[in-house]
């Protein structure tokens, strides 16, 4: 099946999502082992000095680069945190998978696939090249162009209705009401020229599904919501647990929605380095230019970190080191396996 505005062949697979579906299961190691591993990761990487704070929003450049927090939450609701895990910072691009979940849940998978796109772009997060080069002008919800398209799909009679829908949804993922960081919002609004260009580019190809100015403002506001490392771990763990918030017990989205969001995170959550990330860490992840990073192990839990210095692709340096270390130590890696011990020679 091919969709309007796209080229190539898409195989229409049979839907097999039902209550009999076998899902990812397992558990983290014992609490004391998790706590020890988290503390060891913090001690191991706290003195790393590589990377630089993001500079395209002036307020981000002023954040203390020594801030460093780690949080792990299991699907059973067990929390382990160390360092600046309760220090607030702007969610930035880590809002993308959760706004995607909102749109997927409200409008369905087809709206995401055919109106935004789900394939990796291979380009920087703020590049307009994928919009130009893709014959259908589709991108990916984890990069800025695709995220703008996703935000433009959020339903609502007015822009404020749509904003409240976004805030309410992300707050339910976090298990508490999230607030806007006014300083970051003002700074981003005054310097988001690249995103305005992307919004106009999408609009020119009929791939923005709302007013340019309203969509740009909603996108900037959602990126400026204030979270902590613990919030991100809870939000990620909600995706790990089939849409159930591990702290509140509320069903936020359906498990089929979670699976699709995690698939998209795996394709482009760390932008053009997503392939290296999967090769090393083996988990869906999402980074933000404020220094946040969330990783998700379906059925087990979520790891989140906060450390502002970034690498060349806009991903937290310390965050990637921690994720690589703890993915191995906590058994998070989706691609690790052992032979069946009952198997004979």
Image (cartoon, rainbow, N blue to C red):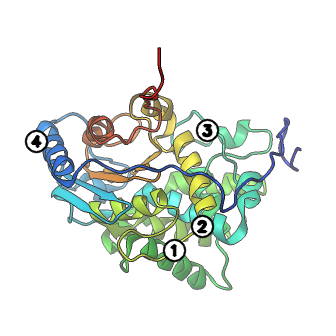
Return the residue at label 2: 254
Callout 1 touching callout 2 (CB < 8 Å): yes
Return the residue at label 3: 120
Residue 37 location in percent, x, y?
18, 43
Neighbourhood count class around disc 4 (C-alpha, 10 Å): few under 14, some 14–19, many 20 upward: few
Is tag 2's residue or tag 4's residue first in the polypeptide sequence?
A: 4
Please identify the quarter of the rendering in which residue 232 is found: bottom left
Give the structural element (helix, strand or loop) at label 3: loop
Answer above or below: position of 46 versus 220: above
Is tag 2's residue or tag 3's residue first in the polypeptide sequence?
A: 3
Residue 36 location in percent, x, y?
14, 46
Instruction: Specify whether 201 is left or right of 278.
Output: right
User: Foreground: 116 or 234?
Assistant: 234
Give the structural element (helix, strand or loop) at label 4: helix
Mark 4 or mark 1: which is in front? Answer: 1
Mark 1 or mark 3: which is in front? Answer: 1
Is tag 3's residue or tag 4's residue first in the polypeptide sequence?
A: 4
The residues bearing labels 3 and 4 have C-alpha atoms spaced at a distance of: 34 Å
Residue 202 location in percent, x, y?
70, 54
The residues bearing labels 4 and 1 have C-alpha atoms spaced at a distance of: 36 Å
Neighbourhood count class around disc 1 (C-alpha, 10 Å): few under 14, some 14–19, many 20 upward: some
Return the residue at label 4: 43
Residue occupying the point 28% across, 60% down: 229
Answer above or below: position of 62 versus 173: above
Is tag 4's residue or tag 1's residue first in the polypeptide sequence?
A: 4
């Amino acid at each position: 099946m091919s969709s309007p505005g796209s080229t190539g062949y898409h195989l229409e697979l049979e839907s097999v999502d039902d209550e009999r579906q076998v899902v990812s299961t397992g558990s983290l190691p014992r609490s004391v082992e998790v706590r020890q591993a988290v503390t060891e990761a913090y001690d191991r990487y706290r003195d790393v000095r590589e990377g630089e704070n993001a500079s395209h929003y002036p307020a981000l450049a002023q954040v203390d680069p020594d801030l460093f927090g780690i949080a792990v939450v299991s699907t059973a609701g067990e929390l382990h945190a160390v360092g600046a895990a309760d220090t607030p910072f702007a969610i930035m691009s880590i809002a993308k998978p959760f706004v995607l979940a909102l749109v997927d849940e409200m409008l369905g998978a087809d709206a995401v696939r055919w109106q935004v796109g789900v394939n990796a772009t291979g380009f920087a997060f703020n590049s307009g090249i994928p919009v130009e080069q893709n014959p259908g002008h589709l991108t990916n919800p984890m990069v800025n162009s695709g995220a703008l398209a996703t935000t433009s799909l959020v339903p609502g009679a007015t822009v404020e209705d749509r904003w409240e829908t976004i805030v309410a949804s992300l707050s339910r993922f976090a298990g508490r009401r999230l607030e806007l960081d006014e300083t970051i919002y003002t700074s981003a609004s005054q310097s988001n020229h690249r995103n305005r260009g992307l919004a106009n580019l999408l609009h020119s190809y009929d791939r923005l599904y709302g007013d340019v100015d309203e969509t740009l403002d909603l996108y900037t506001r959602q990126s400026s919501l204030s979270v902590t490392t613990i919030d991100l771990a809870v939000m990620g763990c909600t995706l790990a647990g089939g849409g159930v918030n591990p702290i509140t017990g509320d069903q936020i989205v359906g498990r089929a929605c979670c699976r699709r969001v995690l698939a998209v995170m795996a394709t482009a959550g760390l932008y053009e380095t997503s392939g290296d990330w999967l090769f090393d860490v083996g988990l869906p992840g999402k980074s933000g230019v404020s220094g946040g990073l969330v990783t998700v192990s379906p059925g087990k839990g979520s790891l989140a970190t906060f450390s502002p210095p970034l690498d060349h692709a806009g991903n937290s340096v310390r965050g990637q080191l921690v994720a690589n270390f703890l993915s191995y130590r906590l058994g998070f890696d989706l691609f690790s396996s052992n032979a069946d011990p009952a198997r004979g020679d």
